[in-house]
Amino acid sequence: MNGLMSSSNFTELDEQILQTTRDSAQKLINIVNTLSNLQDTSTSTAGVVDDILLIAQELLVLHNDSTVLPTSCKQLKIQQPNSPSGYYILAGTNGTHTAYCNMGSLCGSGGGWTRLAYLDMTDATVNCPSGFRLYQSGGVRACGKPVRGASCVSVQFPSNGTSYTQICGRVTGYQWGSPDGIDGVNNINSYYVDGVSITRGSPRQHVWTLIAEYTQSRFSSSSRPYNINSYQCSLLLVIITPVNLVIQVLLHQVPSTHPIHYEMAMVVVFLNHLL
């Protein structure tokens, strides 16, 4: 029995080594090709360095040595300030994971942002999250709730056990019909708004809401102090423990003659990590 278990373990390890070797070999080929045509520019140099770092990280993961890996994009930015935006292997509370790091400035803060959620429905190969329905009209692809009538649907994005201080993101939505903005429901767990709501944690804590209204004048009234043009969300938070982010498409009243009422076509959310 021990011999069989050992043989099985060795077979699994051999396959893992072979796969990592294949992937690393391809990156080495890319490095050779880049070096062959390398010009004296910072961009091309950064690309080579990025490939070398990814190979080193993969080999470290293979040896189960995640302690030397950065735990966040912010830490990576501090340790290696010239790192370009791209995918990196990070060490988390439950092992390693791959994350996209944005090394540029977002929402008034410097680089080192970790992308938590990304949905771009302009890409025909991208599917809606589980539970959402795909709507298509006039060349637009968007995700929304699966049924008509007052209801909502949501999707969670885990923060992978990392504390953070700031959330930055953008939501692009499309409306069809007569959205009511906020009308009659005062419950963050329900369809309290026509639009998209971003919350964190459980129970939900509000982060940002994109509200859809069919006339600007209704937003301008004293009872509706909301800005319909707030498409860029930037909120500074003091968060002690890591939480998940929840994005909801919340629809209050949908006219039966309009199958598409308010759907999200693009969602991108970044986290700025607490060091």
Image (cartoon, rainbow, N blue to C red):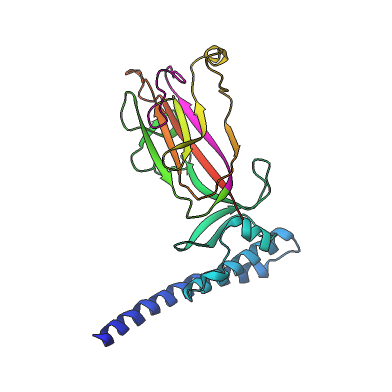
Q: To which quarter of the image does residue 18 belong? A: bottom left
Q: Residue furthest front?
A: 240
State whether residue 60 appears in this view.
yes
| Range covered by the magenta-colored residues | 165-191
* Residue at screen point 56% across, 19% down: 225
* Residue at screen point 38% across, 76% down: 15
Q: Position of residue 8 (x, y in %)?
A: 30, 80
Q: Position of residue 7 (x, y in %)?
A: 31, 84
* Residue at screen point 49% across, 23% down: 212
Q: Position of residue 147 (x, y in %)?
A: 30, 29
Q: Residue furthest left?
A: 1
| Left or right side of 13 for 211 | right
Q: With respect to residue 239, does 211 lie above or below? A: above
| Left or right side of 84 for 242 | left
Q: Residue furthest right?
A: 40
Q: Position of residue 143 (x, y in %)?
A: 40, 35
Magenta span includes 182: yes
